[in-house]
Image (cartoon, rainbow, N blue to C red):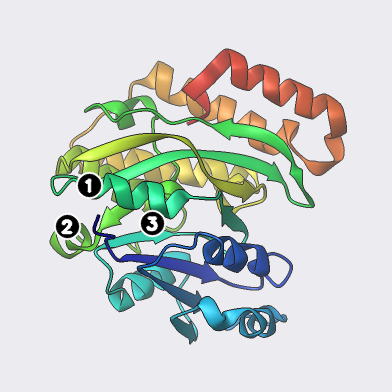
Amino acid sequence: MRNPKISIITVVFNSEATIVDTIESVRAQNYPNMEYIVVDGLSKDRTLDRIHEHGDVITRLVSEKDFGIYDAMNKGIRLATGEVIGFINGDDFYMPGVLAKVAEAFLDPALDACYGDLCYVRQNDISTVVRHWRSSPFVPGAFEEGWCPPHPTFFVRREVYERYGLFDLDYRIAADVELMMRFLERHYINSNYLPGVMVTMRLGGTTNRSWENILQQNKEVLHALKIHGLRANPVRFFSKKLLSAVVNTVLFRDGFGYQSTVMSLALTAVCGDFFG
């Protein structure tokens, strides 16, 4: 069985407390045909020290000023030589066996992309799962209803980026959503949903840090829908986004303790993919 070359890209800035977990989760994949690219935005803490201490698995390290996370991601794509490209952020980590599962999916020459599920954990307690982002197979028009796959689980053939473009830097927070929307809704790439958690993410990312960022993200997503000839279903789109915003900014703050965890599990059970 042929193992397609997979390029993993980590974009990182000031993540000294978490970057080792990310690197070691890549190492633990034990996948035989992989390159690992780390793009650091001139971190001001000890992130680079941590990277060097565990860097034998890293194929290419770049540390230089960038114009934000999506500019750094584009740098990583341009450096990648693998047939398939995936991203894992500097405070996230892979579950065991993810790359083998992805590689098996890409043995189908007609497949352009695949993705799976993601779980959120507390920033300072990765043993506590507070949200399960369960995705689903893509159907045309899904983005109009607020659907989107978890970007850290989204693996794409490099030729798709070459054909349809990289991250649009006009988007400050939602360039990943716009890119997946462009690939799936506008260019109809062939995708496959692989059920099961691929990535664990610590709460506290850019888009779930404040109401202001959540509103900015939704504004950018609505703009992306418009330029790609799509139209949001107001009821489903905004109810889904509002529920997600409440979950991110109220229920799952680290200070809410056991009751918020119980509530999160209950909401996940009731609402299912409404968290997507």
Amino acid type at circle 1 is Phe
Q: Which residue is mark 1?
A: 183
* 173 up-or-down from 18: above or below: above
Element assignment for label 1: helix
Q: Residue placed at 74% from the left, 31% from the top?
A: 251
Element assignment for label 3: loop
Which is more toward the observer, 113 or 257? 113
In the orientation shown, which residue stands out farthest toward the front?
A: 1
Amino acid type at circle 2 is Tyr
Q: Callout 1: 10 Å neighbours few (<14), some, many (20+)?
A: many
Q: Callout 3: 10 Å neighbours few (<14), some, many (20+)?
A: some
Q: Which residue is mark 2?
A: 164
Q: Position of residue 8 (x, y in %)?
A: 41, 65
Q: Position of residue 9 (x, y in %)?
A: 43, 67
Q: Which residue is mark 3?
A: 171
* 200 up-or-down from 133: above or below: below
Q: Residue placed at 86% from the left, 40% from the top?
A: 255
Pointer 2 and pointer 1: residues touching (CB < 8 Å)? yes
